[in-house]
Amino acid sequence: MPNYVKRPESERSCSGIFLSCEYGICIKETGVKRCECDLGATGPLCEHRCCRDCGAHGSCRIIPKDGCDCERNYKGKNCETRIEVPDIFCNCVHGSCNEAGTCKCYEGWTGATCEISCTDNCGQGNTCVKVFGKVMCMQTGLETTSQRSITIIPRLDACNSSYVLRPVKERSCMGMYNCVYGTCFTQAN
């Protein structure tokens, strides 16, 4: 399990946009401020701590529940067991077959067999996903980015492991934004 020690406030402070990065450092680049999380922390403000060490072959996941996402050919609670997975178990068009026989899509592709191209370049810190039959960019980092017809804004509310899609009146996005699994989206005109 990672050792969680907070950095000094002077390293964590992103004044002007956020209070501070909880378990990380504020990176201040030209016109952009963002949190870069320390090992074992995740979330827009590095506010979530992983309960486990995912080792050299995995990355921490908080949502839908805390755990490790293992690299291809690795499995186990901490991604410690190497396995051989032939690509013949699933028909991935733009991706690779994982241990469960489902496709893990390459960047810019989504769908059950990675057959759907993300028509927008989602940019660094974002990923292409299919939500309610529509392909859109979902933010995985802090940068606010606008690409063609999709506008991405920072996550306003982190979801916990018991999160379910709440009725519209209970979602916490401002203005014309819609909450989709804890991230606010809008289709720009």
Image (cartoon, rainbow, N blue to C red):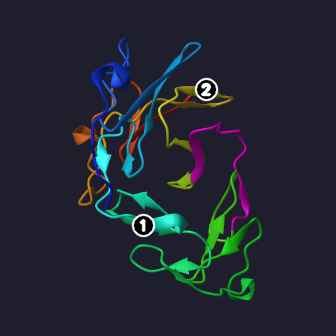
Q: Amino acid at mark 1?
A: Cys
Could you tell me which residue is drawn at 39 percent across and 77 percent down?
77
Pointer 1 local density, CA inside 10 Å: few below 14, some 14–19, many at least 20: many
Q: Is residue 171 above or below residue 151?
A: below
Q: Position of residue 185 (x, y in %)?
A: 47, 35
Q: Which residues are magenta?
A: 114-129
Q: Is residue 95 left or right of residue 104?
A: right
Q: Amino acid at mark 2?
A: Ser
Q: Position of residue 35 (x, y in %)?
A: 43, 31
Could you tell me which residue is drawn at 41 percent across and 73 percent down?
78
Q: Is residue 156 left or right of residue 128?
A: left
Q: Quadrant of residue 170?
A: top left
| Secondary structure, magenta segment, majority class | loop
Q: Position of residue 175 (x, y in %)?
A: 36, 23
Q: Quadrant of the N terminus?
A: bottom left
What count of labels does the image hold?
2
Q: Is residue 83 above or below residue 15?
A: below
Q: Nearer the viewer, residue 47 or 143?
A: 47
Could you tell me which residue is drawn at 65 percent across and 87 percent down?
84
Residue 99 among magenta residues: no
Q: Nearer the viewer, residue 114 or 100?
A: 100
Label 2 belongs to which residue? 146
Pointer 2 local density, CA inside 10 Å: few below 14, some 14–19, many at least 20: some
Residue 125 among magenta residues: yes
How far, Cα to Cα, is label 2 from label 1?
A: 30 Å
SS assignment at label 2:
strand
Label 1 belongs to which residue? 68
SS assignment at label 1:
strand
Q: Is residue 151 visible?
A: yes
Q: Nearer the viewer, residue 121 or 31?
A: 31
